[in-house]
Image (spheres, rainbow, N blue to C red):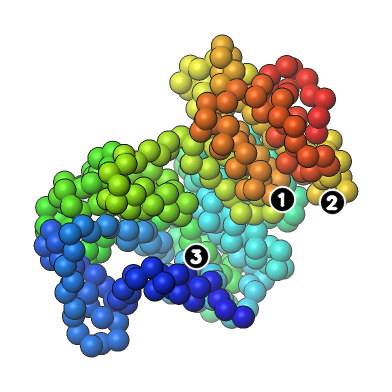
Amino acid sequence: MVDVPTIMFYNLFQNFVTYLKGHGKLTGPNSVTVAMNDGSGEQTITAKNIMLATGSEVIEKLPFVAVDEETIVSSTGALALKKVPEKLVVIGGGVIGLELGSVYERLGSKVTVVEFLPTIGGVGIDSEVSKEMQKILKKQGMSFMLSTKVTGVEKTGSGVKVTTEPAAGGAAESMDADVVLVCVGRREFRDGLGAEDVGVALEGKKVKVNDEFQTSVPNIYAIGDIIHGPMLAHKAEDEGAMVAEYLATGKKPHLDYNNVPSVLYTHPEVAWVGKSEDQLKAEGVAFRKGKFSFAANGRSIANMDTEGFVKVLSCKETDKLLGVHIINAIAGDIISGACIGIEYGAASEDLARVCMAHPTVSEVLKGASQKTAFGKAVSG
């Protein structure tokens, strides 16, 4: 069986791409010096154009936490534990913390998630969706300590002692764990890149780019986690393809960052695109709202997987789609239909009138759209 990386590298070679394995550093506007991983020294390559796509890395350093990747682990170490911990404390209730925490819960760990914010799911998640997902994960066996900050993590002879207190202040508490998983986010990776040395400007901690993804050095481009926007692989992939097309044809890039979907890979999954109900309220936008539960969907009932719903938000005046939010086992697949609708300016009525296959799980998107457009559903 051929693994995915092997296939990917084969495709690169088929397209005449030279692969150098090492740490690259900008040494000029047209040159990159690579310190080779095999110890053979350095190799300098020159190019007409350079694209920076160095991605991001796990934030491991907290004032009171020393990650050792054994009993106090990052998301990287969590994938290499020698055994399933009996008790796992997850610091951070964002996407990665929930994904890995739910995996270990299904493997048999007693999982407690400690989150500073009052909701789980991280930035951008709809609060109604967050609350519903918390109920589902709690029913599965996960515990949550929200509006809580971790003030200490100390290794003991038998495991790890975690000290917490309310985010607003209050009495400290402690709990024991076999393993502590630190999931407090990711940061752009620019260590040793040399970008600033050759004149590449920053915007905060991100590399500053224009609409063509050019940096302040015209022939150096940047994409992905080191520039603005969500840290998502599919967002970076689209940006990379757009830069390549721009360099080859001169066609101007276009990416609507409001239409980049996010997916939380738990079970069930959570997926969303566009605006949340909270964002629309904060922006003073009048909107329509329609929800349809998978408990009323024939295929979901047959699959014995009825948790969750689809929520469709549209402009109150024009009915233009503004956001779609889904909790379902295949939410990440269903959200693509919503992305197409938002990309081409569809109204909720447009989705409501599309003929969708029955019985399918994805037709709940049509049912929710009917509720948004007409106030009631006849499909689902």
Please tell me whether mark 3 or mark 2 is closer to you in this view. Answer: 2
Residue depicted at 61% across the width and 60% down the height = 101
Reading the image, the residue beneath label 3 is: 75
Reading the image, the residue beneath label 2 is: 303
Specify which label sits upstream in the sequence, 1 or 3. 3
Q: Residue type at mark 2: give it.
A: Asn
Specify which label sits upstream in the sequence, 3 or 2. 3
Q: Quadrant of residue 19?
A: bottom left
How far is the residue under mark 1 from the one under mark 3?
Answer: 23 Å
Helix or strand or loop: what does disc 3 sit on? helix
Residue 3 percent location from the top left of the image = 55, 76
- Numbered circles on residues, count: 3
How far is the residue under mark 1 from the one under mark 2?
Answer: 10 Å
Specify which label sits upstream in the sequence, 1 or 2. 2
The answer to which of 237 and 354 lies nearer the viewer is 354
The answer to which of 86 and 327 lies nearer the viewer is 327
Residue depicted at 84% across the width and 35% down the height = 296
The answer to which of 3 and 17 lies nearer the viewer is 17
Give left or right: position of 141 versus 35: right
Q: Give the number of the disc on residue 329.
A: 1
Give left or right: position of 88 versus 212: right
How far is the residue under mark 3 from the one under mark 2?
Answer: 32 Å
> Furthest residue to the top?
317
Q: Residue type at mark 1: give it.
A: Ala
Residue 291 percent location from the top left of the image = 71, 28
Q: In which quarter of the image is residue 109?
A: bottom right
Give left or right: position of 2 versus 243: right
Residue 209 percent location from the top left of the image = 25, 44
Q: Is residue 304 above or below residue 37?
A: above
Residue depicted at 18% across the width and 52% down the height = 219
Tag 3 and tag 2, C-beta contact below 8 Å? no
Question: Which quadrant of the rendered structure holds the N terminus?
Answer: bottom right
